Image: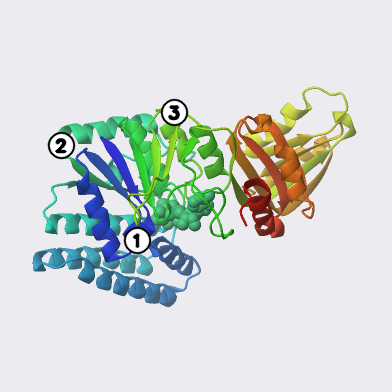
Amino acid sequence: MKVMKFGGTSVGKPERMQQVAKLIVQDEESKIVVLSALSGTTNALVEISNALSQGDKSGARQQIQALQDHYKIFYNQLLVAPPALEKATACINEHFEFLNIIVKISFSEALNKDILAQGELLSTKLFSIYLEEIGVDHLLIPALDFMTIDNYDEPQIGSIKVKLTQILQRNKGKKIFVTQGYISRNAKGEVDNLKRGGSDYSASLIAAAIQASVCEIWTDIDGMHNNDPRVVTKTVAIEQLSFDEAAELAYFGAKILHPASIWPAQFYKVPVKLLNTMQPTSKGTLITELAGSSGVKAVAAKDGITVIQIKSSRMLLAYGFLRKVFEVFEKYRTSIDMVTTSEVAVSVTIDNDVQLKEIIKELEPFGTIEIERNQAIVSIVGNEINETKNVLQHLFNSLTDIPVRMVNYGGSHHNISILIPKEYKTKTLQLLNKGLFGLE
Ligand code: ADP
Ligand code: ASP
Ligand code: MG
């Protein structure tokens, strides 16, 4: 059994959704199809939620109406037969009525999550109605019946596995299952989600849970490229990546994959394929244990980074200093991405500054604390890059005009990271495209 996940653009137009149906019936293997919301929907739901959190009920109502109009046009182009159209009308009315009821009650974080869940609920229901119309036997299985996260927002893979296996056991004759990406239930049993872009994570968790033969991520580009195509004009697809390389790229900003989406597949040894819905015959990227080749493969960038520097003469020759510093970050569940040390100072970077105030307060007894916000991490990823000839030379020759603030080299065999002010991100990616890949 395999997993096929289709992102927002892959289902964002009626003809694309029809193409998805073709792709899933084309191959014989039984499958779980994971769908995102239609492109633009989650953004619209975020706006509706924001309007409600600010008490702007009439703004929210207008946005809900605009979204409903969009769905009406969508399903009238997707479907033909009157029974299917009736079902779609009832489905759309139900979900938008729900949104309109939410407008009337007082806003809360739990309701926010309910609002955000509507996108994936709508896309999967419409897809299921379409499959029924064209006579494709399938079963829609609600992700909220098996996808759960704990108190710390971590997916409960053990319980996901048990619940999903039971569902599949009960429906042995079925070959096509359809479910929602992104949405989950939290420890309180409320509707929640796996954060933006989370459908990739859902797909990987499902693939791990059922020990799928492959986890296919179908999107709007032919695989992982060597650089961010939104920033750099000329980029090329990478044929093969190891799980470690793909995980680094996803974590350090390659939007094609949710930051956490590789570990479930890696841990449960399920190959991942990145494929293009619009060009289904193009090779895409295969991600397995094997790297395929050595050397630099790709660069990615992640902004919104904060540097914290702790300067202390007490650090001089003191053992146990770093442990105490790291314990503060552990206490506030804030992960550190980059670390550099000298005899008198240590600098660390974080991408989540929600608890920064508390962290600074606890670090102050250790020395002088300096904070710099608005930084970006640029990661250079590849297999055995620390053994690749002249890689540092090429890297620094390309960046003579960039004020590099930190460098991490040697932390792993497949990553070199540099920290730069965010405003240099685009220029850095462009310079590296030329300096490391010879692409302009
Ligand atoms: P989906 O809606 O299918 O989940 P996303 O928009 O989340 O699609 O991810 C695909 C997009 O990721 C591409 O259209 C591309 O602009 C962007 N992207 C950023 N970095 C990379 C990269 N290194 N390789 C490929 N795509 C990338
Ligand atoms: N619909 C969600 C989002 O836009 C999840 C996803 O597309 O992966 O973030
Ligand atoms: Mg995505």
- Tell whether label 2 touches label 3 (CB within 8 Å): no
Residue 434, placed above or below residue 379: below
- Tell whether label 1 touches label 3 (CB within 8 Å): no
Residue 179, placed above or below residue 86: above
Q: Earlier in the sequence, mark 3 or mark 1?
A: 1
Residue 8 position, x and y percent, is 37, 58
Q: Quick one: SS at disc 2?
A: loop
The residue carrying mark 3 is 267
At 15% across and 37% down in the image, what residue appears? 171
Residue 318 position, x and y percent, is 84, 24
Amino acid type, mark 2:
Asn
**Side of 47 where 68 appears, left or right:** left
**Side of 163 where 82 appears, left or right:** left
Q: Quick one: SS at disc 1?
A: loop
Q: How many marks?
A: 3
Q: Give the CA separation, mark 1 to mark 2.
A: 28 Å
Q: Is residue 360 visible?
A: no
Q: Give the CA separation, mark 3 to mark 2.
A: 27 Å
The residue carrying mark 1 is 38
Amino acid type, mark 3:
Phe
Amino acid type, mark 1:
Leu
Residue 383 position, x and y percent, is 58, 33
Q: Nearer the viewer, residue 347 or 266?
A: 266
Q: Is residue 243 visible?
A: yes
Q: Give the CA separation, mark 3 to mark 1.
A: 30 Å
Q: Nearer the viewer, residue 277 or 362?
A: 277
Image quarter of residue 278: bottom left
The residue carrying mark 2 is 171
Give the numbered dot on residue 221: none
At 27% across and 54% down in the image, what residue appears? 20
Q: Around disc 1, counting alpha carbons within 10 Å, would you say few (fewer than 14), some (14 to 19), or many (20 or more)?
A: many
